[in-house]
Amino acid sequence: MPKFDIDQLTEPAGAIEAYLSDYFDQRDLPANLRDAAKYALLGGGKRMRPILVVRCCEAVGGKIDTALPAAAAIELIHCFSLVHDDLPAMDDDDLRRGRPTLHIATNEAMAILAGDLMNTMAFELITDKVENPKLACELVRELAIATNDMIAGQVYDTIPCFPEGLSDLQELQLIHHNKTGALLRCACRMGAIVGEADESQLTAITDYAAAIGLMFQVVDDLLDITQTTEQLGKTAGKDLVQGKLTYPSLIGIDATKQQIVELQQQAHEALDKLKVPDNALRDLCDFMATRSN
């Protein structure tokens, strides 16, 4: 049995979702565009990235109110990436979070445009809601770098153009470091930054983020072949069908499970360097290591 209360751990999700909904409702937009974006944005999900923003902020002494703009912004980027990832030209999926993907629920043009909107609205929201211009600029830079790294990861994954001389495992790590890891690292760093972390705290949070960023996707690789579509809320087994590089396909299921344990330990060791209580971050790491969807 887990040692943590998942409902308590993910409690900030409610405040984040309300913040996002309110922001959309006050923005002057065509009704069909707003509805499409909110369908993708508020239709379930673990909210792991914005929760990490809040919990990393709290871990270095900050408050949730100061973290909400950054938390909302990174969820906008994440949801934009899912909408575009599901498009026929990309992974061509018709199920996301247990519901039809946005291009199925509306149409392909609307899905593209709603994704575009969420992408740029993330930066609009930060500059609108973060009063300190220097802090807003720092957050925009962190998020822009992570978004571009995520896009690079999508290219590595779907239109491969790798540096020469990499092994299959190195290529896979490069995909995961960028496609999934970039936003998870960004979430942790933005939370620490708005919480006014000192240099040593930011370094510890960054090391933690690097470990959980890779671990999260290694777990995804494992779940893709061990869980059903109903359990995942998205199409299971697609990586195998598409012949994609995954940890289980390269090193086997048992070694993949061991890799998850090792990355989990690395994340815990990074948190040992923090000089403040960090139980929520440890619990989030353990939840991500043992999740079933």
Image: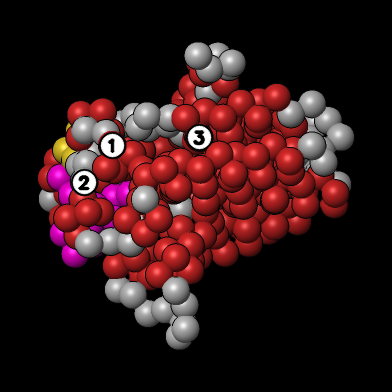
Q: Find numbered disc 1 in the image and state the secondary structure of the residue it sits on.
A: helix
Which quadrant would residue 230 be assigned to in this image? top left
Taking the spot 65% from the left edge, 31% from the top edge, the residue there is 281
Real-space CA distance between mark 2 and mark 1, rounded to the nearest whole angstrom: 8 Å
Point out the tag, 2 or 1, that comes first from the N-terminus.
1
Residue hosting label 3: 289
Q: In the image, is residue 19 above or below residue 260?
A: above
- The type of residue carrying mark 1 is Thr
User: What span is colored magenta in the figure?
Assistant: 82-94
What residue do we see at 37% from left, 50% from top? 252
Task: For residue 11, say whether it is visible.
Answer: no
Q: Are marks 3 and 1 in contact (CB under 8 Å)?
A: no
In front of the other: 217 or 194: 217
Q: Which residue is mark 1?
A: 226
- Please state the horizontal and vertical placement of residue 147, each as a whole percent of the image: 49, 60
Label 3 sits on a secondary structure element that is helix
Res 237 label: 2
Q: Residue at x 68, y 58 (%)?
A: 137
